[in-house]
Amino acid sequence: MAGVIVTLVVITITVASGVCLGAFIRLSLAIRSEDRKKWSLRLDAPSASAKAARSLIGVSESGW
């Protein structure tokens, strides 16, 4: 029984990690794509959510 519980915990952690990594990569690609099209990362973030996304990914205005 303990082996089944350990297996379920490992599967849950693996799936959760995959979802988080996938979301991070998707967000990174969306930000970079936006910058290539509009050069918008050279300007201040237009909203609080955009600013939060940039800080999550590690993009700041001073680095550009």
Image (cartoon, helix red, strand yellow):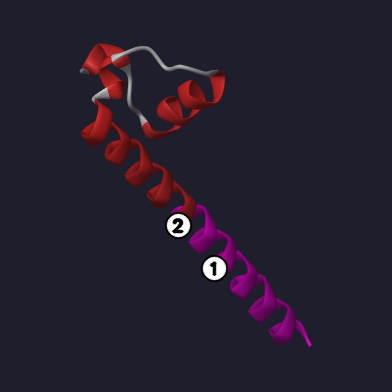
Q: Nearer the viewer, residue 17 or 62?
A: 62
Residue at position x 47%, y 21% in the image = 51
In the image, taking residue 51 as reference, residue 7 lies left or right, namely: right
Question: Which residue is disc 1 drawn over?
Answer: 14
Residue at the spot 52% in from the left edge and 53% down from the top edge: 20
Q: Are marks 2 and 1 in contact (CB under 8 Å)?
A: no
* Kind of residue indicated by mark 2: Gly
CA gap, disc 2 and disc 1: 12 Å
15 above or below 45?
below
Residue 22: mark in rendering: 2
Q: Earlier in the sequence, mark 2 or mark 1?
A: 1
Residue 64 falls in image quadrant? top left
The secondary structure type at the circle numbered 1 is helix
Q: Nearer the viewer, residue 32 or 7?
A: 32
Say if the magenta span includes residue 6.
Answer: yes
Q: Position of residue 4 (x, y in %)?
A: 72, 85
Above or below: residue 55 compared with residue 42? below
Give the magenta-colored segment's residue range: 1-21
Residue at figure coordinates x 69%, y 85% from the top left: 3
